[in-house]
Each structure stands twice: as structure tokens, then as C-alpha cells.
Amino acid sequence: MNNGIFPGGKEWRWLDLRSFRLQSDRVERANYNKNSTEMFLFTDIDRGGQRYAYYSDLNGMYSAETYETINPYWQADYATVHFSLAPPGGQPYANKDIYLAGQLTNYELNEKTQMVFNKEKGLYEISLLLKQGYYNYTYISVDRNNPQIRVDLEGNYWETENSYTILMYYKSFTDRSDQLIGVSRINSRSDRPGVSF
Amino acid sequence: MIRFTANINGLDSFSAAQQVKVVILQNNRWDNAIRDIAPTFVRAIRSISVR
């Protein structure tokens, strides 16, 4: 039985697509076609060996936002976004499948979210159709010999800021369904005893 | 590790371990939610703890 232990992960990678005209910090170049837009991002480097560094993030979520329109929900544009990840030495990870994950993929690990290794470039690549907004994402590795082993490719750090939601349900012996009776949220960083920042 | 205590005074529950269930989410995700948690103690003052 798991007693409430989660791997901490790392702070999430970010992608600012609130504007397609203003190419933000992670965007290398863009193709503005007549009927579509393509955004090419800078290659992500495996951060597995790096020390933990704090920065504020959305904890894997995204937010539909635009600079140039009033209402992002039905006025925002879409673009095909090309991600790439450089594994150490330009070699694919042995016996591992790599997936891009976040709320933007609904954390689903399937053929649409799996990174494909490009041998000529030595990079993992994936393309997603995304709406204008601010995105968080990460890379998840799955062991081919044991698919239950799904880990954050870049490791786990005890310092990582994560939010936790505790949901408590009650079902008496005569009830037909569970009732939600309590919700509590805690943050690993701001709710840590003795330290808050 | 997430540790918490919940007060169940208002509940009509003589067997909290079987009638109360807890789900813990990390960063609002349901794909890695922890569901198989049972209380470590149910105390006479009607609170349950997960340690």
C-alpha cells in the first residue's frame, strides 16, 4: 500500500505562446503560412544532472491567454508546435520510451504524445497543435520492459514545489454512492512547517 | 509523504475505516492519484489519521 508518497519531480518546463507574432523565449522561429502557423521551439536539453533551481510555474497546467485579442477562449489562434529534446550524447535512451506530458496532453501516454527519435539529428521530436496560451510540460520515461515504471525523465527533487489536494469521501453502508465531505489543499513549499516563502 | 488528520465528528459512522475514503491529487492530476489509503488510526475522539 502506498502511504501518500508522491515523487517530487522537477519544476515544470514552460512555453509562452500568448502571442504568435512576438516569439517568446523558448521559440526559435516560426512559419506563418496562409492557413496555418508553425512554431519551432529551441531544443530542450536533458536537465537530469542539473541541481534543483526554484522558479514559479503552473505545476503542469496551462492557461489559455492571448495578448492580441479580448477573449482567449474563442478568439485565440492555433499553431502546430514542434518540440525537440536532446538526450545525452545524441543517443536514444536505452529501453525507454519518452513522452511529452502535462495538462496540455491530459497526461495521456499514447502514440500521440510519444516522442519519436530522429537518428539524423540525434533528437527526440514531437509536434502538437496548441491554442494560444501559457503552457507547462515535462518529459516522462517509460521502461519498455516494465511499462508500470513511469518516471519523470529528469529526476525527482525534494525541494520541488508541488500542490496536493486531499479529497475525503464518505459512504455509509446504506448509501449507493460516495459523497465528497472534505477538500483540503497544501503546498509543499509554502505550507512547509517553519519555512514559508 | 502527505500526513493528515480529519475530524469526523459530524458523521454517522461507526466504522470509519470502511466508510471513509481518501484520494490525494498532486498538482490537480488524476492520472497519478493515490486512492488506496486507509486510516492509520481511528481515535475515540472521532478523528482519523493517515501517517
Image (cartoon, coloured by chain):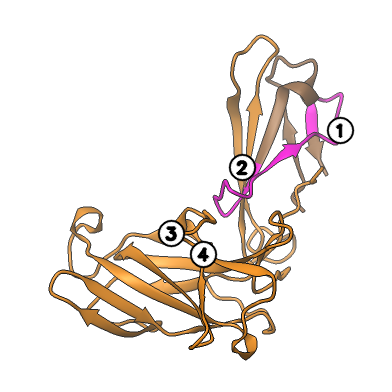
Quarter holding the N terminus of chain A? top right
Q: Position of residue B47 (x, y in %)?
A: 78, 30
Counting residues from the N terminus, which is met first, the one under dot 4 or under dot 3? Answer: 3
Q: Are marks 3 and 2 on the same chain?
A: yes
Q: Residue at x 17, y 64 (%)?
A: A69
Q: Chain of mark 3?
A: A
**Camera-side mark, 4 or 3:** 4
Report the disc number at residue B41.
1
Q: Chain B rendered in what hue?
A: brown
For label 3, the residue is A104
For label 4, the residue is A114
**Camera-side mark, 3 or 2:** 3
Marks 1 and 2 in Cβ contact (< 8 Å): no
Chain coloured orange in this rendering: A
Give the CA separation, mark 1 to mark 4.
43 Å
Counting residues from the N terminus, which is met first, the one under dot 3 or under dot 2? Answer: 3
For label 2, the residue is A184
